[in-house]
Image (cartoon, rainbow, N blue to C red):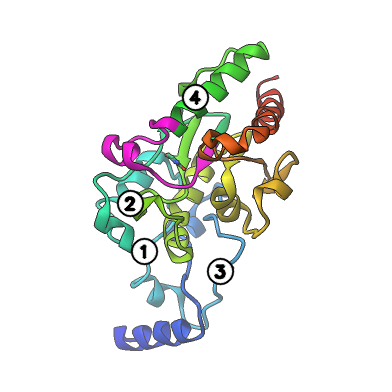
Amino acid sequence: MTKDEVRNRLLFYQDLGIKTIYRREATLTASPVPSPQPPVPRSQSPVPSPQPRSAIAELVLPLAPVHDNLSKISEDIGDCKRCRLHEGRNRIVFGSGNEQARLVFVGEGPGADEDEQGLPFVGRAGQLLTQMIEGTAHKEGIPLKRQDVYICNVVKCRPPENRTPQPDEMEICGQFLFRQLQAIRPKAICALGSTAAKAILGTKEGVMRLRGRWLEWRDIPVIVTYHPSYLLRPYNQNAKKEAWDDLKKVLHYVYD
Ligand code: URA
């Protein structure tokens, strides 16, 4: 198959509304050890190609290399210009914390402080998150510091005016979030707010309906709770108790 034929085939898929094609690493089939499959968002499934995979593979980047890890993922993100969010960013905010964390927190996307420092949750919402994690753990007798967990976002570049990330931005950046989660494979994931819940669980349900119960991402338990920015608003103070309850639940599950 020539490159033009492959291109036409991909354009045909695009016309059908198929935006993402996943392929396996060539080494996957050769590997004697069964390796984790590339994470696939629930809203999509791998596209069975009628053409030989090797032809299409020439045009499609590998999304989840075998033995993936955080530095590989960060390297693959590179100086990312895959979506419009790169236009206004100062820094890519990849994530921070323990690569072997048993608990991962996922937020929505960087704000101004995060964009400036290149680190997630370092502004006002971040201070509240740190306080929530360390304060609740301490009260519950769990010796846990922020650096023991891993914290990242659905999108790695700051959306203009802190707007909610758009579906295509979430889809493009989501592949890296899924790789992060798959590489860390924590004991549990805590989704902060509805954007994180939507990206991880592929649901349109709001936090109020999702919070407080165990859900799942690729057999890893997920708890959804309120985003710390939501809890900072004076009229949402009632939600704080619920957020603390959610946090207690996930902390005891992970660290008891
Ligand atoms: N809000 C987020 O969702 N993520 C951050 O990193 C900071 C604020």
Horizontal and vertical percent for residue 211? 70, 42
Graded by Cα atoms within 10 Å as few (under 14), some (14 to 19) or many (20 or more), the crowding at tag 3 reads few
Work out which quarter of the rendered image holds the C terminus and state it. top right
Foreground residue, 16 or 71? 16
Which residue is identified by label 4? 130
Quick check: 23 above or below 121?
below
- Could you say where residue 238 lies in the image, as x and y percent from the top left? 68, 33
Q: What residue do we see at 27% from left, 60% from top?
A: 81
Cα–Cα span, label 1 and label 3:
14 Å
Q: Is residue 5 left or right of residue 182?
A: left
Q: Which residue is mark 2?
A: 76
Type of the residue with mark 3: Pro
Q: Secondary structure at mark 4?
A: helix
Residue 245 x, y percent position in the rendering: 71, 28
The alpha-carbon separation of the residues under discs 3 and 4 comes to 37 Å
Badge 3 residue CB within 8 Å of ligand 1? no
Mark 4 CB lies closer than 8 A to ligand 1: no
- In percent of the image, x 33 and y 51: which residue is there? 76
Q: Nearer the viewer, mark 3 or mark 4?
A: 4
Looking at marks 2 and 3 on the same chain, the residue that comes earlier in the sequence is marked by: 3
Residue 147, given in percent of the width and then of the height, sits at 45, 22
Disc 1: which residue: 61
The answer to which image quadrant residue 185 occupies is top right
Total labels drawn:
4
Q: Residues within 10 Å of mark 2 (few under 14, many from 20)?
A: some
What span is in magenta?
105-124
User: Going 54% across and 18% down the picture, which residue do you hit?
Assistant: 134
The numbered mark at residue 46 is 3
Q: Amino acid at mark 1?
A: Leu
Which circle's residue, 1 or 2, is located before the other in the chain? 1
Which callout, 4 or 2, points at the residue further toward the start of the chain? 2
